[in-house]
Amino acid sequence: MKNIRCFLIILLFIGACAACSINIPWDVMDDYDGVYVIMHVIPDDADVLLNGRAIGVAYEFASSASALRLASRENELIFKKKGFREKVVDLRNYSSRHITVKVDLADLESQAAPGAPAAPPAAGDKQAYEAKTEPLPPQPAEKPAPADERFLTQVAFTVTPEETAVYIDGRFWGPAPAAGKAIILRLPPGKYAFTAYHPGFKVFSREVTVPKQEKFALEIALEK
C-alpha cells in the first residue's frame, strides 16, 4: 500500500513539473476578439492602403507590438511603391485571426516592358548604335513655407478607451496609450481629420482646427 502511495506522489510531482514548463503563446492568452495583421514587406517602406485608404508604411506594422488591429477579416490591403508593381491582399483568404502577410513587390525596372527598345548591338556589329538623350525638364523652384507652417502648436489629446486606433488625415498614427496619459504632437496650425476606432465602440470622426497658439488640448472619447 505504501509503495502505491509513493508511486502516486511521484506521478503527481512529475505532472506538476511538466505543467510548469508549458509555454503558452501570447496570442492564445490575448483576449482581443478582432484580427491582428503583421506585415513583412519588401521593400519595407511601401505604402499600405486599407480598403483603398492610406494607413501608413509597411514597417510600421512589422511586429506583434505594432500589428494592425481590425474587427474582422473582411478587409483588403494594398501595398504600393513607385517603381514597383502593387500587390493586393484579401484578408478573407486567411483562416487565423493572427495573420502574417509576406509580400515581395516586383521591381518594374527589372522586368522588360512589352515594346521596350532592344539592347544596343555589340561592338563587333556593323550597325552603329546612337544613344539618344532628352533634356531634363526644368526643376520647379522651392516655395517658402507659409508662415503658419513654420509655427508649430503643441497638441495634447487624450483618447478613451486605451488601445484605440488613431488616424490623423487618413494616416495611422498608432494605438492610444493607457488611460490618463496624453498624446503630445507638434502640428502646424490648420484643419485635421481625426479618426479613432476600437472594436465594440462607435467610430469617432471629426475635423478639428488646430489654432495658432502655444498649446491646444483635445479629448476623444468613444461611445459604445
Image (cartoon, rainbow, N blue to C red):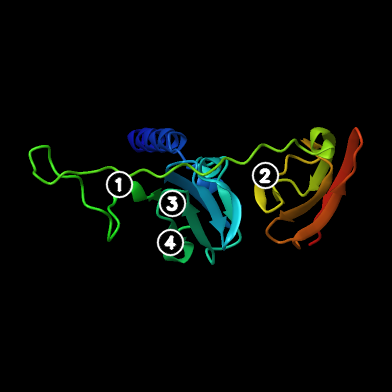
Q: Nearer the viewer, residue 80 or 114?
A: 114
Number of the label disc, if any, that sits on residue 110: 1
- C-alpha gap between disc 2 and disc 4: 26 Å
Split into 4 quadrants, where in the image is the C terminus?
Answer: bottom right
Type of amino acid at the residue the image marks with label 1: Ser
Residue 169 shown left or right of residue 181 in the figure: left
Numbered tag placed on residue 186 in the rendering:
none
* Nearest-to-viewer mark from 1 and 2: 1
Residue at 8% from the left image edge and 43% from the top image edge: 125
Instruction: Specify the amino acid type for callout 3.
Output: Val
State the CA–CA distance, disc 2 to disc 3.
20 Å
Name the disc covering residue 101, or none.
3
Give above or below for 179 relative to 193.
Answer: above
Q: Tell me the residue at 28%/42% (across/down).
A: 131
Q: Earlier in the sequence, mark 3 or mark 1?
A: 3
Going from the N terminus, do you reach mark 1 or mark 2 first? 1
Residue 173: mark:
2
Horizontal side of 207 relative to 142 (left or right) equals right
Q: Label 4 belongs to which residue?
A: 94
Task: List x then y, in percent, for residue 190.
Answer: 83, 46
Mark 2: secondary structure: strand
Q: Residue 207, how many percent across, how many down?
A: 82, 56
Residue 152: image quadrant is: top right
- Secondary structure beneath dot 4 equals loop
Q: Position of residue 121 (x, y in %)?
A: 15, 44
In space, the residues marked 1 and 2 are separated at their CA atoms by: 34 Å
What's the amino acid at mark 4?
Answer: Tyr
Neighbor class of circle 4 (other Cα within 10 Å; few <14, some 14-19, many 20+) is few
Mark nearest the camera among 3 and 1 is 1
Taking the spot 48% from the left edge, 52% from the top edge, the residue there is 80
Q: Which label lies toward us, 2 or 3?
A: 2
Callout in the foreground (3, 4): 3
